[in-house]
């Protein structure tokens, strides 16, 4: 029996959570018996993937901006037809109406699934509710990565072709089984250096207020992004140079995560943050703000981590000290961490994707 052919369309396979997920999805679908094609709009590949890669940027280099976009659209359509693609999964940001109307035309005749990765719907929907409905009402499904996102999409756009499939963790068995004899006095953030999403101002302010560095703790920030200068400036402003270290992006930061006492998330908004899921899967508790969306669907306060009111540096500082000082609470959260996200294993989430794509 010939395999169903699926194309995953994303901006790239580098840097962000949505791009990282696009790489993960290739493995899930290949293991589920699909023939997988990744189509990327921009030439950036940092994350692992499997199957065939088609790089629209490389195929259409050298043209001026507007013509380049038209050529990319034509290349995309040709590739889908020539490779007999049956299913398209689109995980790009999709808020420019004209571009999306053209893309809808490019996608005609294919079964289309769209992913919504963030609670900030402005990234995935044009500003007009009317046109958003036109764009999406005939899609096979709008796949939301959290229940909160699905509820928001349903109520805002009155669409009934929505479903929720959460992001999985993809960590090798040997990594999960590694025994870390003793954690270091390190608080870790790993992810994209993007202030308007991740809110490093809050994180650094809370770390400063906590005075936890007086107990020998350090804050490690690992990642890449456009706001490195802002973060460095903020560290200087708060006189934290001796206590905060910045590390480059790592594709597999799992050793660092396991060695950390706990990891932190202070975002203004999220979708379903992989860093939280991966941290817990590796047995490292998390302190996260209760932002929309994701953390409250993953973290059970006082069970596998601490959930803190957002935009409240004092409350976040207190939570940090709680984990540093209350070993009974900390050890209880640590003991429960891995088990609490078992349902988000790659195998379980792959099964949900397989069922959705095979449903006619």
Image: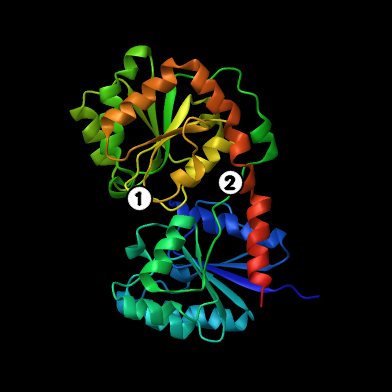
Does residue 118 appear left or right of residue 29 in this picture?
A: left
- Judged from the image, the secondary structure of the residue bearing numbered disc 1 is loop
**Mark 2 Cα within 10 Å, few/some/many (few <14, many 20+)?**
many
Alpha carbon separation for disc pair 1 and 2: 20 Å
Q: Where residue 170 sits in the image (x, y, percent)?
A: 61, 46
Residue 170 is marked as none
- Image quarter in which the N terminus is found: bottom right
x, y percent for residue 163: 53, 65
Q: Quadrant of residue 204?
A: top left
Measuring from the top left, give residue 65's x and y in whole percent.
31, 74
Location of mark 2 (residue): 169
Which callout, 1 or 2, points to the residue nearer the camera? 1
Q: Residue furthest left?
A: 237
Residue that badge 1 annotates: 269
Residue 29, by quadrant, is bottom right
Sequence-first disc among 1 and 2: 2
Up/down of 238 relative to 212, above or below: below
Seen at 58% across and 50% down, the residue is 168
Image location (x, y in percent) of residue 185: 44, 19
């Amino acid at each position: 029996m010939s395999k169903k052919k699926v194309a995953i369309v994303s901006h790239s396979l580098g840097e962000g959570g949505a791009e990282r997920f696009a790489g993960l999805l290739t493995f899930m679908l290949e293991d589920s018996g699909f023939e997988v094609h990744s189509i990327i709009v921009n030439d950036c590949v940092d994350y692992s993937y499997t199957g065939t890669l088609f790089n629209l940027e490389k195929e259409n280099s050298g043209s001026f901006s507007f013509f380049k976009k038209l050529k990319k659209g034509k290349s995309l359509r040709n590739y889908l037809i020539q490779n007999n693609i049956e299913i398209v999964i689109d995980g790009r940001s999709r808020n420019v109406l004209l571009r999306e109307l053209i893309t809808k035309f490019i996608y005609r005749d294919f079964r289309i699934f769209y992913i919504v990765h963030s609670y900030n719907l402005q990234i995935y929907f044009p500003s007009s509710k009317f046109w958003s409905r036109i764009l999406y009402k005939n899609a096979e499904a709008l796949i939301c990565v959290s229940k909160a996102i699905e509820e928001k999409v349903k109520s805002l756009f009155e669409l009934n072709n929505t479903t929720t499939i959460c992001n999985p963790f993809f960590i090798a068995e040997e990594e999960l089984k590694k025994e870390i004899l003793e954690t270091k006095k390190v608080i870790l953030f790993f992810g994209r250096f993007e202030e308007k999403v991740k809110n490093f101002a809050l994180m650094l302010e809370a770390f400063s207020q906590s005075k936890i560095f007086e107990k020998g703790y350090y804050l490690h920030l690992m990642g890449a992004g456009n706001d490195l200068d802002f973060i460095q400036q903020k560290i200087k402003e708060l006189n934290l140079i001796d206590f905060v270290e910045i590390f480059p992006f790592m594709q597999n930061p799992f050793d660092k995560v396991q060695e950390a006492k706990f990891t932190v998330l202070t975002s203004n908004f999220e979708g379903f943050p992989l860093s939280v899921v991966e941290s817990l899967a590796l047995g490292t508790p998390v302190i996260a703000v209760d932002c929309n969306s994701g953390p409250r669907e993953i973290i059970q306060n006082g069970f596998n981590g601490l959930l803190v009111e957002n935009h409240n540096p004092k409350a976040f500082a207190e939570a940090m000290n709680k984990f540093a000082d209350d070993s009974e609470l900390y050890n209880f959260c640590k003991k429960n961490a891995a088990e609490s996200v078992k349902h988000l294993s790659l195998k379980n989430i792959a099964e949900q994707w397989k069922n959705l794509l095979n449903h006619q």
